[in-house]
Image (cartoon, helix red, strand yellow):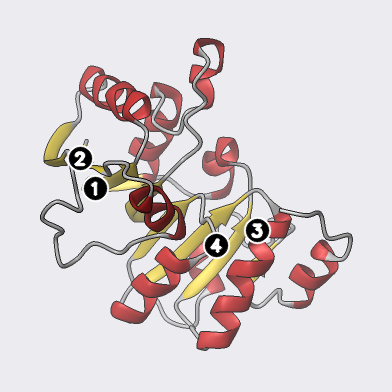
Amino acid sequence: MRNKPWAIDYLESNNHIVDVNNTYSKRIKEFFSEDRPVHIEVGTGMGTFVTTLAQNNPDINYVGIEIDKNVMIRVTEKVVELGLTNVRLLLLDANKLMEYFNEGEIDKVYLNFSDPWPKTRHAKRRLTHKNFLTSYKQLLKEGSLVEFKTDNRGLFEFSLMSMNAFGMKFENLNLDVHDDEPKENIRTEYEEKFSQRGHKIYWIQASF
């Protein structure tokens, strides 16, 4: 996405929705008007997934996490347009999740169409690497789910092995989501694009 020099100024002008400067670090519940369960999406894309979830589940607070300020503009615009009070956004590197959140305060983690980082030397950057799984386990309440979707077969296989080695319990595995699509599935922008190209969509739901 083209760089927007005014991106940070725009996001900071919407600081009731977007935390650019870690203002709510270690106190995420104060960012919302009501105390509800907190679900996080690590990597928001253009925001269709998290905003649709929020519309469908007004009794849950959603936190969309994105590192790209230009992408975050699009997500912020959707939240504003829809008038959602149960979505808050963090301009944050996923490596800093444990610096931002407290242990055991998150009820669910979503990972949708994450960068596959296909080169072996970049494996630690994959959001299902054991280092990230360690963070999720600390953040999540006991028995809570990590939900993961991808069209990338290599990342799917890596994630299966990584989660299994970490001792996670697989609650659901779907090797072709769109073959018999569950009614609860929410298609992201990337999901629509990859599906139209004939890619299979893989889905994992796993708990610690």
Mark 4 or mark 2, which has the lower sequence index? 4
Residue, disc 2: 207
Give the class, few, some or many, for how many residues have Cα within 10 Å of label 3's Cα (few <14, many ≥20): many
Is residue 50 visible in this depiction of the protein? yes
Q: Are marks 4 and 3 in contact (CB under 8 Å)?
A: yes
Locate residue 165: give its quadrant. top left
Instruction: Say few, some or many: other residues with alpha carbon within 10 Å of mark 4 (under 14 / 14 to 19 / 20 or more).
Output: many
SS at mark 2? strand
Q: Is residue 153 left or right of residue 126?
A: left
Instruction: Give the distance between the C-alpha atoms of the residues marked 4 and 2, in whole angstroms.
Output: 26 Å
Tell me the number on the disc at residue 46: 4
Q: Is residue 17 visible?
A: no
Looking at this view, name the residue that lies furthest to the right: 5
Q: Amino acid at mark 2?
A: Ser
Residue pointed to by mark 1:
145
Picture residue at 53% right of the left edge, 43% below the top = 97
**How many residues crowd around disc 1 within 10 Å: few (fewer than 14), some, or many (20 or more)?**
many
The residue lying toward the viewer, choosing from 172 and 191, is: 191
The amino acid sitting under disc 3 is Val
Going 23% across and 49% down the picture, which residue do you hit? Answer: 144
* 98 is higher (above) or lower (below) than 104: above
Residue 155: % across, % down? 37, 28
In screen coordinates, is 31 left or right of 22?
left
Q: Earlier in the sequence, mark 3 or mark 2?
A: 3
